[in-house]
Amino acid sequence: MKKHTTNIDVLIVGAGASGIYAAKTLKEHGIKVLVLEATERIGGRLFSKEIADSKHYVELGGQWLAKEGQTRLNDLIVRYQFKKSTNHQQGRWMHDDGSRFVAKKEGSLPLSFFAALESLKFIKHLEKKAQSISLDAPWNTPSLDQVSLHAWLSQRFWLKETEIYWRNRMEQALCCDLRKVSLLEVLLSAKTVGNFERYQGADHYFFAQGLANLFVQIVKDHEIDVRLNAPVHAVKQYTDHVVVTTENDEIDAKAVLFAVPPQTLRNITFDEQLPETFANMLVDFVQGTVVKVVGVYAQKWWRNRGLSGLIMSQNGPFDVVVDSSFDTLEKGILVGLVTGSRASKLKDLNQEELKSKFEEYVQSALGVAPPLEDFLHMDWNQATYTQGAYSSKRALGHWLTARDALQSPFGRVYFAGTETAREWRGYVEGALESGERQARQIVDLLKR
Ligand SMILES: Cc1cc2nc3c(=O)[nH]c(=O)nc-3n(C[C@H](O)[C@H](O)[C@H](O)COP(=O)(O)OP(=O)(O)OC[C@H]3O[C@@H](n4cnc5c(N)ncnc54)[C@H](O)[C@@H]3O)c2cc1C
Protein backbone atom coordinates (compact mmCIF):
# COMPACT_ATOMS: atom_id res chain seq x y z
CA MET A 1 0.00 0.00 0.00
CA LYS A 2 1.51 3.36 -1.05
CA LYS A 3 1.75 6.30 1.34
CA HIS A 4 -0.51 9.08 -0.01
CA THR A 5 0.65 12.69 0.38
CA THR A 6 -1.53 15.70 -0.43
CA ASN A 7 -1.28 19.46 0.19
CA ILE A 8 1.87 19.87 -1.88
CA ASP A 9 1.88 22.78 -4.32
CA VAL A 10 4.89 21.74 -6.40
CA LEU A 11 6.67 18.46 -6.54
CA ILE A 12 10.25 18.63 -7.76
CA VAL A 13 11.91 15.51 -9.12
CA GLY A 14 15.70 15.59 -8.62
CA ALA A 15 17.85 17.14 -5.87
CA GLY A 16 20.62 18.37 -8.16
CA ALA A 17 21.53 22.04 -8.51
CA SER A 18 18.51 22.85 -10.72
CA GLY A 19 15.97 21.08 -8.50
CA ILE A 20 17.25 22.60 -5.25
CA TYR A 21 17.51 26.09 -6.74
CA ALA A 22 13.97 25.80 -8.12
CA ALA A 23 12.77 24.68 -4.67
CA LYS A 24 14.52 27.66 -3.06
CA THR A 25 12.91 30.07 -5.58
CA LEU A 26 9.44 28.57 -5.04
CA LYS A 27 9.78 28.65 -1.26
CA GLU A 28 10.73 32.31 -1.45
CA HIS A 29 7.31 32.81 -3.07
CA GLY A 30 5.62 31.02 -0.16
CA ILE A 31 4.91 27.90 -2.22
CA LYS A 32 4.83 24.48 -0.56
CA VAL A 33 7.42 22.23 -2.16
CA LEU A 34 8.54 18.62 -1.86
CA VAL A 35 11.69 17.32 -3.58
CA LEU A 36 11.96 13.62 -4.47
CA GLU A 37 15.48 12.36 -5.11
CA ALA A 38 16.22 8.91 -6.50
CA THR A 39 19.63 8.47 -4.84
CA GLU A 40 20.82 8.66 -1.23
CA ARG A 41 22.37 12.13 -1.57
CA ILE A 42 21.79 15.74 -2.58
CA GLY A 43 23.85 17.15 -5.48
CA GLY A 44 23.29 14.95 -8.56
CA ARG A 45 26.22 15.66 -10.87
CA LEU A 46 27.88 17.50 -7.96
CA PHE A 47 29.54 14.91 -5.74
CA SER A 48 32.00 16.14 -3.09
CA LYS A 49 34.05 13.75 -0.94
CA GLU A 50 36.10 14.70 2.07
CA ILE A 51 39.83 13.93 2.09
CA ALA A 52 40.05 11.96 5.34
CA ASP A 53 39.89 14.22 8.44
CA SER A 54 40.96 17.31 6.52
CA LYS A 55 37.75 19.38 6.12
CA HIS A 56 38.80 19.69 2.46
CA TYR A 57 36.63 18.13 -0.24
CA VAL A 58 37.53 16.85 -3.71
CA GLU A 59 34.98 16.82 -6.48
CA LEU A 60 33.99 13.73 -8.47
CA GLY A 61 31.52 15.76 -10.52
CA GLY A 62 31.20 19.48 -11.28
CA GLN A 63 34.07 21.41 -9.75
CA TRP A 64 34.79 24.83 -11.22
CA LEU A 65 33.17 28.25 -11.19
CA ALA A 66 33.97 30.54 -14.12
CA LYS A 67 36.17 33.58 -13.80
CA GLU A 68 33.19 35.75 -14.78
CA GLY A 69 29.57 35.57 -15.85
CA GLN A 70 28.23 32.83 -13.56
CA THR A 71 26.34 35.27 -11.37
CA ARG A 72 23.90 32.95 -9.57
CA LEU A 73 26.56 30.46 -8.53
CA ASN A 74 28.94 33.24 -7.57
CA ASP A 75 26.25 34.84 -5.38
CA LEU A 76 25.76 31.52 -3.57
CA ILE A 77 29.53 31.17 -3.09
CA VAL A 78 29.66 34.62 -1.54
CA ARG A 79 26.51 34.08 0.56
CA TYR A 80 27.88 30.83 2.05
CA GLN A 81 31.45 32.18 2.38
CA PHE A 82 33.04 29.43 0.29
CA LYS A 83 36.73 30.16 -0.17
CA LYS A 84 37.93 30.31 -3.78
CA SER A 85 40.95 28.23 -4.86
CA THR A 86 42.48 28.35 -8.35
CA ASN A 87 44.28 25.72 -10.39
CA HIS A 88 48.03 25.85 -9.96
CA GLN A 89 49.56 26.79 -13.32
CA GLN A 90 53.10 27.89 -12.52
CA GLY A 91 55.78 25.83 -14.21
CA ARG A 92 56.12 23.77 -17.34
CA TRP A 93 53.28 21.54 -18.47
CA MET A 94 53.55 18.21 -20.28
CA HIS A 95 52.10 17.49 -23.69
CA ASP A 96 51.49 13.88 -24.65
CA ASP A 97 51.53 13.88 -28.46
CA GLY A 98 50.74 10.19 -28.72
CA SER A 99 54.31 8.93 -28.87
CA ARG A 100 56.13 10.90 -26.13
CA PHE A 101 55.80 13.62 -23.49
CA VAL A 102 57.15 17.06 -24.34
CA ALA A 103 57.63 19.79 -21.72
CA LYS A 104 55.93 23.05 -22.74
CA LYS A 105 56.32 26.59 -21.48
CA GLU A 106 53.70 27.90 -19.06
CA GLY A 107 50.68 29.27 -20.97
CA SER A 108 51.78 27.90 -24.38
CA LEU A 109 49.53 25.99 -26.80
CA PRO A 110 50.36 22.55 -28.23
CA LEU A 111 50.26 24.05 -31.74
CA SER A 112 52.68 25.35 -34.35
CA PHE A 113 52.65 29.08 -35.16
CA PHE A 114 50.44 28.70 -38.26
CA ALA A 115 48.04 26.29 -36.58
CA ALA A 116 47.70 28.75 -33.67
CA LEU A 117 46.84 31.52 -36.16
CA GLU A 118 44.30 29.31 -37.91
CA SER A 119 42.80 28.49 -34.51
CA LEU A 120 42.30 32.16 -33.69
CA LYS A 121 40.52 32.67 -37.00
CA PHE A 122 38.36 29.63 -36.31
CA ILE A 123 37.31 30.93 -32.87
CA LYS A 124 36.22 34.25 -34.39
CA HIS A 125 34.26 32.41 -37.10
CA LEU A 126 32.56 30.18 -34.49
CA GLU A 127 31.59 33.17 -32.34
CA LYS A 128 30.15 35.03 -35.32
CA LYS A 129 28.15 31.98 -36.40
CA ALA A 130 26.83 31.48 -32.85
CA GLN A 131 25.66 35.09 -32.72
CA SER A 132 23.69 34.63 -35.95
CA ILE A 133 21.33 32.01 -34.46
CA SER A 134 18.30 32.63 -32.29
CA LEU A 135 18.02 31.16 -28.79
CA ASP A 136 14.22 31.53 -29.02
CA ALA A 137 13.81 29.86 -32.39
CA PRO A 138 16.96 27.94 -33.33
CA TRP A 139 14.95 25.86 -35.83
CA ASN A 140 14.90 28.95 -38.06
CA THR A 141 18.40 27.95 -39.20
CA PRO A 142 17.50 24.40 -40.33
CA SER A 143 20.65 23.70 -42.36
CA LEU A 144 22.77 23.97 -39.19
CA ASP A 145 20.75 21.22 -37.51
CA GLN A 146 21.26 18.87 -40.43
CA VAL A 147 25.04 18.96 -40.53
CA SER A 148 27.03 17.07 -37.92
CA LEU A 149 29.86 18.77 -36.08
CA HIS A 150 32.17 16.06 -37.43
CA ALA A 151 31.27 16.82 -41.07
CA TRP A 152 31.46 20.56 -40.55
CA LEU A 153 34.91 20.42 -38.93
CA SER A 154 36.29 18.31 -41.75
CA GLN A 155 35.74 21.22 -44.18
CA ARG A 156 37.00 24.03 -42.00
CA PHE A 157 40.78 23.91 -41.83
CA TRP A 158 43.78 24.23 -44.12
CA LEU A 159 46.04 22.44 -41.69
CA LYS A 160 45.46 18.87 -40.51
CA GLU A 161 47.15 19.83 -37.24
CA THR A 162 44.48 22.46 -36.47
CA GLU A 163 41.70 20.07 -37.42
CA ILE A 164 42.99 17.33 -35.10
CA TYR A 165 43.43 19.84 -32.28
CA TRP A 166 39.84 21.10 -32.59
CA ARG A 167 38.35 17.65 -33.00
CA ASN A 168 40.06 16.69 -29.74
CA ARG A 169 38.95 19.83 -27.94
CA MET A 170 35.37 19.47 -29.11
CA GLU A 171 35.26 15.79 -28.16
CA GLN A 172 36.64 16.65 -24.71
CA ALA A 173 34.06 19.40 -24.23
CA LEU A 174 31.08 17.41 -25.51
CA CYS A 175 32.30 13.95 -24.37
CA CYS A 176 30.58 12.27 -27.31
CA ASP A 177 30.91 11.19 -30.92
CA LEU A 178 30.91 14.38 -33.00
CA ARG A 179 28.97 12.56 -35.74
CA LYS A 180 25.90 12.43 -33.49
CA VAL A 181 25.45 16.13 -32.71
CA SER A 182 24.55 18.95 -35.02
CA LEU A 183 26.48 22.14 -35.53
CA LEU A 184 23.35 23.97 -34.35
CA GLU A 185 23.32 22.21 -30.95
CA VAL A 186 26.95 23.17 -30.38
CA LEU A 187 26.51 26.77 -31.50
CA LEU A 188 23.48 27.11 -29.23
CA SER A 189 25.45 25.90 -26.22
CA ALA A 190 28.27 28.31 -27.13
CA LYS A 191 25.76 31.13 -27.41
CA THR A 192 24.46 30.46 -23.90
CA VAL A 193 28.02 30.95 -22.58
CA GLY A 194 28.63 34.20 -24.49
CA ASN A 195 32.10 34.23 -25.96
CA PHE A 196 35.25 32.17 -26.15
CA GLU A 197 36.99 34.15 -23.41
CA ARG A 198 34.25 33.21 -20.97
CA TYR A 199 34.46 29.59 -22.07
CA GLN A 200 38.26 29.63 -21.57
CA GLY A 201 37.74 31.00 -18.07
CA ALA A 202 35.05 28.46 -17.13
CA ASP A 203 37.39 26.22 -15.11
CA HIS A 204 38.73 28.87 -12.78
CA TYR A 205 37.72 28.61 -9.11
CA PHE A 206 37.09 25.55 -6.99
CA PHE A 207 36.19 25.14 -3.35
CA ALA A 208 37.57 23.22 -0.39
CA GLN A 209 34.07 23.12 1.14
CA GLY A 210 32.72 21.01 -1.76
CA LEU A 211 30.11 22.24 -4.26
CA ALA A 212 27.54 19.56 -3.35
CA ASN A 213 27.65 20.86 0.23
CA LEU A 214 26.52 24.26 -1.02
CA PHE A 215 23.21 22.67 -1.98
CA VAL A 216 22.96 20.70 1.27
CA GLN A 217 23.34 24.06 3.02
CA ILE A 218 20.58 25.66 0.90
CA VAL A 219 18.25 22.78 1.79
CA LYS A 220 18.93 23.37 5.51
CA ASP A 221 18.63 27.16 5.40
CA HIS A 222 15.41 27.19 3.40
CA GLU A 223 13.97 24.18 5.23
CA ILE A 224 13.34 22.41 1.93
CA ASP A 225 11.63 19.06 2.36
CA VAL A 226 13.73 16.46 0.45
CA ARG A 227 12.89 12.75 0.35
CA LEU A 228 15.95 10.67 -0.60
CA ASN A 229 15.92 7.16 -2.12
CA ALA A 230 12.64 8.01 -3.83
CA PRO A 231 12.90 7.48 -7.59
CA VAL A 232 9.83 8.71 -9.43
CA HIS A 233 8.28 6.18 -11.80
CA ALA A 234 5.10 7.70 -13.16
CA VAL A 235 3.00 10.83 -13.59
CA LYS A 236 -0.74 11.15 -14.12
CA GLN A 237 -2.20 14.47 -15.17
CA TYR A 238 -5.66 15.80 -14.27
CA THR A 239 -7.15 19.20 -15.15
CA ASP A 240 -6.11 20.86 -11.88
CA HIS A 241 -3.41 18.60 -10.43
CA VAL A 242 -0.91 15.81 -11.05
CA VAL A 243 -0.29 12.53 -9.23
CA VAL A 244 3.30 11.36 -9.04
CA THR A 245 4.27 7.87 -7.93
CA THR A 246 7.38 6.27 -6.51
CA GLU A 247 7.69 2.72 -5.21
CA ASN A 248 6.29 3.73 -1.81
CA ASP A 249 4.59 7.06 -2.37
CA GLU A 250 1.71 8.58 -4.25
CA ILE A 251 1.79 12.36 -4.13
CA ASP A 252 -0.76 14.94 -5.29
CA ALA A 253 0.54 18.33 -6.36
CA LYS A 254 -0.61 21.26 -8.47
CA ALA A 255 2.43 20.92 -10.74
CA VAL A 256 5.54 18.80 -11.10
CA LEU A 257 8.99 19.96 -12.18
CA PHE A 258 11.38 17.34 -13.56
CA ALA A 259 14.88 18.65 -12.77
CA VAL A 260 16.65 15.57 -14.15
CA PRO A 261 18.97 14.74 -17.06
CA PRO A 262 16.65 14.39 -20.09
CA GLN A 263 17.71 10.83 -20.92
CA THR A 264 16.38 9.67 -17.52
CA LEU A 265 12.89 10.85 -18.55
CA ARG A 266 12.74 7.77 -20.80
CA ASN A 267 12.14 5.71 -17.66
CA ILE A 268 9.13 7.75 -16.51
CA THR A 269 5.64 6.62 -17.46
CA PHE A 270 3.42 9.50 -18.50
CA ASP A 271 -0.26 8.54 -18.60
CA GLU A 272 -0.87 11.01 -21.36
CA GLN A 273 1.28 10.09 -24.33
CA LEU A 274 4.11 12.53 -24.99
CA PRO A 275 3.98 13.98 -28.51
CA GLU A 276 5.82 11.64 -30.87
CA THR A 277 8.56 14.12 -31.76
CA PHE A 278 9.19 14.76 -28.05
CA ALA A 279 9.40 11.04 -27.28
CA ASN A 280 11.74 10.47 -30.22
CA MET A 281 13.95 13.31 -29.07
CA LEU A 282 14.30 11.70 -25.63
CA VAL A 283 15.20 8.34 -27.13
CA ASP A 284 17.91 9.90 -29.29
CA PHE A 285 19.43 12.25 -26.69
CA VAL A 286 23.23 11.92 -26.95
CA GLN A 287 24.76 11.13 -23.57
CA GLY A 288 28.29 12.27 -22.79
CA THR A 289 30.80 9.72 -21.51
CA VAL A 290 33.03 10.85 -18.65
CA VAL A 291 35.19 9.24 -16.00
CA LYS A 292 36.72 11.55 -13.39
CA VAL A 293 39.62 10.43 -11.18
CA VAL A 294 41.27 12.11 -8.20
CA GLY A 295 44.71 11.15 -6.89
CA VAL A 296 45.77 12.39 -3.45
CA TYR A 297 49.49 12.51 -2.52
CA ALA A 298 51.15 13.48 0.78
CA GLN A 299 52.75 16.46 -0.99
CA LYS A 300 52.67 18.53 -4.18
CA TRP A 301 55.92 16.83 -5.27
CA TRP A 302 55.77 17.85 -8.97
CA ARG A 303 56.01 21.56 -8.07
CA ASN A 304 59.56 21.10 -6.72
CA ARG A 305 60.53 19.95 -10.22
CA GLY A 306 59.31 23.17 -11.87
CA LEU A 307 56.19 21.40 -13.19
CA SER A 308 52.65 22.74 -13.02
CA GLY A 309 51.18 19.22 -12.85
CA LEU A 310 49.18 19.83 -16.04
CA ILE A 311 49.29 16.98 -18.56
CA MET A 312 47.36 17.27 -21.83
CA SER A 313 47.10 14.39 -24.18
CA GLN A 314 46.10 13.82 -27.79
CA ASN A 315 45.15 10.16 -27.43
CA GLY A 316 46.55 8.88 -24.15
CA PRO A 317 44.29 7.23 -21.56
CA PHE A 318 43.55 10.57 -19.80
CA ASP A 319 42.54 13.71 -21.72
CA VAL A 320 43.86 16.02 -19.08
CA VAL A 321 45.41 15.88 -15.62
CA VAL A 322 45.43 19.07 -13.58
CA ASP A 323 46.78 20.20 -10.20
CA SER A 324 43.73 20.93 -8.01
CA SER A 325 45.55 21.15 -4.69
CA PHE A 326 44.53 23.61 -2.00
CA ASP A 327 46.88 26.25 -0.59
CA THR A 328 45.45 25.48 2.85
CA LEU A 329 46.37 21.77 2.71
CA GLU A 330 49.84 20.25 2.36
CA LYS A 331 48.59 17.31 0.30
CA GLY A 332 48.97 17.27 -3.48
CA ILE A 333 45.83 16.62 -5.56
CA LEU A 334 45.84 15.67 -9.23
CA VAL A 335 42.50 15.47 -11.01
CA GLY A 336 42.19 13.48 -14.25
CA LEU A 337 39.38 13.54 -16.80
CA VAL A 338 38.66 10.92 -19.41
CA THR A 339 35.98 11.68 -21.96
CA GLY A 340 34.21 10.28 -25.03
CA SER A 341 35.69 7.22 -26.71
CA ARG A 342 38.64 7.14 -24.26
CA ALA A 343 36.22 6.84 -21.32
CA SER A 344 34.39 3.97 -23.04
CA LYS A 345 37.71 2.06 -23.15
CA LEU A 346 38.08 2.34 -19.35
CA LYS A 347 34.58 1.25 -18.44
CA ASP A 348 35.52 -2.34 -17.56
CA LEU A 349 38.45 -1.43 -15.30
CA ASN A 350 37.97 -1.80 -11.54
CA GLN A 351 39.19 0.77 -9.00
CA GLU A 352 42.63 -0.90 -8.57
CA GLU A 353 43.23 -1.21 -12.32
CA LEU A 354 42.25 2.39 -12.89
CA LYS A 355 44.49 3.52 -10.04
CA SER A 356 47.48 1.64 -11.55
CA LYS A 357 46.77 3.20 -14.95
CA PHE A 358 46.67 6.66 -13.40
CA GLU A 359 49.88 6.14 -11.40
CA GLU A 360 51.69 4.80 -14.45
CA TYR A 361 50.53 7.70 -16.62
CA VAL A 362 51.45 10.38 -14.09
CA GLN A 363 54.90 8.80 -13.60
CA SER A 364 55.58 8.68 -17.34
CA ALA A 365 54.72 12.36 -17.64
CA LEU A 366 56.02 13.90 -14.40
CA GLY A 367 58.70 11.40 -13.35
CA VAL A 368 59.02 9.03 -10.41
CA ALA A 369 56.18 9.69 -7.98
CA PRO A 370 55.61 8.85 -4.31
CA PRO A 371 52.74 6.44 -3.59
CA LEU A 372 49.17 7.70 -3.73
CA GLU A 373 47.55 8.18 -0.33
CA ASP A 374 44.08 7.97 -1.78
CA PHE A 375 42.47 7.44 -5.17
CA LEU A 376 38.84 8.06 -6.07
CA HIS A 377 36.95 7.73 -9.31
CA MET A 378 33.46 8.14 -10.71
CA ASP A 379 32.13 6.78 -13.98
CA TRP A 380 29.07 8.93 -14.68
CA ASN A 381 27.65 6.54 -17.24
CA GLN A 382 27.26 3.88 -14.56
CA ALA A 383 25.13 6.20 -12.41
CA THR A 384 21.57 4.93 -13.01
CA TYR A 385 19.89 8.31 -12.47
CA THR A 386 22.42 10.35 -14.45
CA GLN A 387 23.48 8.08 -17.35
CA GLY A 388 26.22 10.34 -18.69
CA ALA A 389 27.93 13.72 -18.33
CA TYR A 390 28.99 16.49 -18.39
CA SER A 391 25.63 17.12 -20.04
CA SER A 392 23.70 15.46 -22.82
CA LYS A 393 22.92 16.89 -26.22
CA ARG A 394 20.02 16.84 -28.63
CA ALA A 395 20.78 14.51 -31.53
CA LEU A 396 21.28 15.62 -35.11
CA GLY A 397 18.06 17.05 -36.55
CA HIS A 398 16.05 17.17 -33.31
CA TRP A 399 15.84 20.95 -33.01
CA LEU A 400 13.94 20.84 -36.29
CA THR A 401 11.50 18.14 -35.26
CA ALA A 402 11.00 18.64 -31.50
CA ARG A 403 11.54 22.41 -31.39
CA ASP A 404 10.91 23.84 -27.89
CA ALA A 405 10.08 20.54 -26.16
CA LEU A 406 11.55 20.64 -22.61
CA GLN A 407 11.59 24.45 -22.70
CA SER A 408 7.83 24.74 -22.32
CA PRO A 409 5.52 22.69 -20.05
CA PHE A 410 3.61 19.60 -21.06
CA GLY A 411 0.31 20.27 -19.26
CA ARG A 412 1.27 20.67 -15.59
CA VAL A 413 4.64 18.97 -16.11
CA TYR A 414 7.63 21.34 -16.29
CA PHE A 415 11.25 20.59 -17.15
CA ALA A 416 14.49 22.08 -15.80
CA GLY A 417 18.09 20.93 -15.70
CA THR A 418 21.25 22.25 -17.24
CA GLU A 419 20.34 20.75 -20.64
CA THR A 420 17.44 23.21 -20.88
CA ALA A 421 19.41 26.31 -19.82
CA ARG A 422 19.45 29.59 -21.71
CA GLU A 423 22.63 30.72 -19.99
CA TRP A 424 25.71 28.54 -19.46
CA ARG A 425 24.04 25.38 -20.78
CA GLY A 426 25.84 22.29 -19.49
CA TYR A 427 27.25 24.08 -16.42
CA VAL A 428 26.07 24.39 -12.81
CA GLU A 429 25.14 28.00 -13.58
CA GLY A 430 22.89 26.69 -16.37
CA ALA A 431 21.21 24.32 -13.92
CA LEU A 432 20.48 27.26 -11.59
CA GLU A 433 19.19 29.45 -14.42
CA SER A 434 16.84 26.73 -15.66
CA GLY A 435 15.55 25.96 -12.15
CA GLU A 436 14.90 29.61 -11.42
CA ARG A 437 13.18 30.27 -14.78
CA GLN A 438 10.90 27.24 -14.54
CA ALA A 439 10.06 28.04 -10.90
CA ARG A 440 8.93 31.51 -12.01
CA GLN A 441 6.72 29.99 -14.71
CA ILE A 442 5.16 27.72 -12.10
CA VAL A 443 4.55 30.71 -9.80
CA ASP A 444 2.60 32.28 -12.68
CA LEU A 445 0.60 29.08 -13.19
CA LEU A 446 -0.34 28.91 -9.50
CA LYS A 447 -1.46 32.54 -9.50
CA ARG A 448 -3.96 31.93 -12.33
C1 LIG B 1 32.72 15.00 -14.09
C2 LIG B 1 31.94 16.26 -14.23
C3 LIG B 1 32.60 17.48 -14.25
C4 LIG B 1 31.88 18.67 -14.38
N1 LIG B 1 32.54 19.84 -14.29
C5 LIG B 1 31.84 20.99 -14.20
C6 LIG B 1 32.48 22.20 -13.85
O1 LIG B 1 33.67 22.22 -13.57
N2 LIG B 1 31.74 23.35 -13.82
C7 LIG B 1 30.40 23.35 -14.09
O2 LIG B 1 29.77 24.42 -14.03
N3 LIG B 1 29.76 22.20 -14.40
C8 LIG B 1 30.43 21.03 -14.44
N4 LIG B 1 29.79 19.84 -14.68
C9 LIG B 1 28.36 19.88 -15.03
C10 LIG B 1 27.48 20.14 -13.79
O3 LIG B 1 27.85 19.27 -12.76
C11 LIG B 1 26.03 19.92 -14.19
O4 LIG B 1 25.72 20.81 -15.25
C12 LIG B 1 25.02 20.22 -13.07
O5 LIG B 1 25.44 19.71 -11.84
C13 LIG B 1 23.69 19.59 -13.48
O6 LIG B 1 22.69 19.87 -12.53
P1 LIG B 1 21.20 19.43 -12.82
O7 LIG B 1 20.39 19.81 -11.65
O8 LIG B 1 20.79 19.94 -14.16
O9 LIG B 1 21.22 17.84 -12.98
P2 LIG B 1 21.74 16.71 -11.97
O10 LIG B 1 22.84 17.22 -11.14
O11 LIG B 1 22.00 15.52 -12.81
O12 LIG B 1 20.51 16.45 -11.00
C14 LIG B 1 19.45 15.62 -11.35
C15 LIG B 1 19.02 14.81 -10.12
O13 LIG B 1 17.83 14.10 -10.47
C16 LIG B 1 17.89 12.81 -9.87
N5 LIG B 1 16.98 11.94 -10.60
C17 LIG B 1 17.09 11.47 -11.87
N6 LIG B 1 16.02 10.70 -12.20
C18 LIG B 1 15.22 10.71 -11.11
C19 LIG B 1 13.95 10.11 -10.82
N7 LIG B 1 13.31 9.35 -11.71
N8 LIG B 1 13.39 10.32 -9.61
C20 LIG B 1 14.00 11.12 -8.67
N9 LIG B 1 15.21 11.69 -8.90
C21 LIG B 1 15.80 11.50 -10.11
C22 LIG B 1 19.35 12.44 -9.97
O14 LIG B 1 19.69 11.43 -9.07
C23 LIG B 1 20.02 13.78 -9.67
O15 LIG B 1 20.28 13.93 -8.29
C24 LIG B 1 30.46 18.64 -14.53
C25 LIG B 1 29.80 17.41 -14.50
C26 LIG B 1 30.52 16.23 -14.33
C27 LIG B 1 29.77 14.94 -14.22
Image (spheres, rainbow, N blue to C red):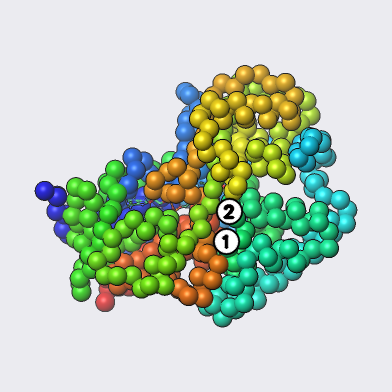
User: In terms of image quadrants, where is residue 116?
Assistant: bottom right
- SS under mark 1: loop
Q: Is residue 403 left or right of residue 33?
A: right
Q: Position of residue 36 (x, y in %)?
A: 29, 51
Name the residue beneath numbered marker 1: 180
Q: Residues within 10 Å of mark 2 (few under 14, many from 20)?
A: many
Q: Position of residue 234 (x, y in %)?
A: 26, 58
Q: Is residue 110 visible?
A: yes
Indicate the amino acid at tag 2. Cys
Are the residues flagged by discs 2 and 1 in contact, CB closer than 8 Å?
Answer: yes
Indicate the amino acid at tag 1. Lys
In the image, farthest residue toward the left: 1
Is the residue 152 above or below the residue 142 in the image?
Answer: above
Name the residue beneath numbered marker 2: 176
Spatial CA distance of label 2 from label 1 is: 8 Å
> How many marks overall?
2
- Residue at horizontal 56%, vertical 37%? 346
Q: Quadrant of the C terminus?
A: bottom left
- Residue at horizontal 72%, vertical 44%? 314
Is the residue 63 above or below the residue 135 in the image?
Answer: above
